[in-house]
Image (spheres, helix red, strand yellow):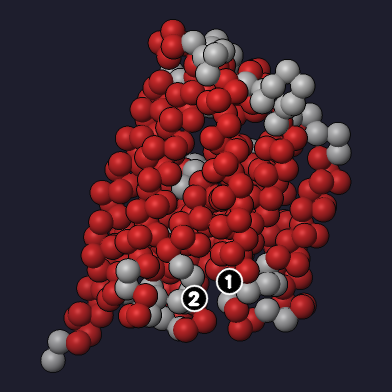
Amino acid sequence: MSAAARTPSWSALQTAAVLLLCRMSFFFCCDLPYSAAYAKGMLTAALAETVLLLPLLILRRRIRFPHGVLWIYRIFSLISAALLAAEGFRLLVSLHSAQPALFAAMFFAVLLYTVSRPQAATARSAVILLVIVSAALLLLPVSGIRSAHRISLYMPGSFWDAFFREFRCSPEIAVLPVLLSHQKQHEQYAPHAVAVWLAGRLAVLPGLVLFGAMQNGRLTHGAGRPFFLLLAGAPLSDAVRTDGFWMLFAAGSAVLCVSFFMQIAVPPSRRPARALFAVMLLLLGITSLLLRSGYRGTGLGAAAVLLGNLLPAVQILIQRKGRRP
């Protein structure tokens, strides 16, 4: 694998922060009603992903991708960036944003700057955002514990919808082999980064869904996005609401995560202004196509699993056969 595709300067916390924010960005955009079945499906899928990642962690030091294979990850990253941008626009529309088209234009204008920055800047920004959101999440149970109703956990929900949605909304799994192909002096970086990322996936998000289920009660698809319904039911106080903060955070997280995927999609050695502008136009075109077609990521989870687990294993087998006399 070329040195340009590596991220040896990233720490475990920085890598985990980027991965967690990618998953949370899709989580904010989710329209599946919160329920105990949703939390169970999410937790089960995260556990399955953990098992699937074990071979990757064991064999990570042997992964070396040729230039041609890297282009598969770059194309997938471009599609993931476009899907996240499309989901963010749908979120704006569902929240009755005053000018969603103007916001989308500002979003892509900001991306022109953030994508051109080094990957290390994205990693540092991710840690700052993760610290902020961690503090904000701690306030939710404090402000909403009195209005939570455990009986709402018995409302019906679809386990399998949540299970497959979790895979579909976790495209960061596919780029893990690229991130974990690092230099030898950073060997402890991989397991620590994945451990922090999985801790958030296994504990924080399912717990947030359960808390939201107790808050949202009988609310269904037509009532809005579940996470923002949770905020409406659990204000910080009678005079202070946090909806604006979370909308701002969701937008910032989306910008960072789309930038992250685009920085993988665009080779670092090929980022002159014209090429970068052309790739951003391509991203805009794909995003528009996804919005018009109504595509929500069907098949993306299977592709992420194949790229994150099967392709590295196949590549290692090919390398072993090539070394035999």
Q: Earlier in the sequence, mark 2 or mark 1?
A: 2
Q: What residue does disc 2 label?
A: 9
Residue at 30%, 41% in the rendered image: 47
Q: Quadrant of residue 147?
A: top right
Q: Quadrant of the C terminus?
A: bottom left
Amino acid on which disc 2 is placed: Ser
Residue at 74%, 26% in the rendered image: 240
Residue furthest out toward the bottom: 325
Which residue is nearer to you in this view: 46 or 293? 46
Residue 249 visible in this rendered orientation of the protein: yes
The answer to whether mark 2 and mark 1 are in CB contact below 8 A is: yes
Amino acid on which disc 1 is placed: Ala
Residue at 86%, 34% in the rendered image: 98
For residue 131, the mark is none
Image spot of residue 285 (x, y percent): 72, 56
Residue furthest out toward the top: 151
Q: What residue does disc 1 label?
A: 120
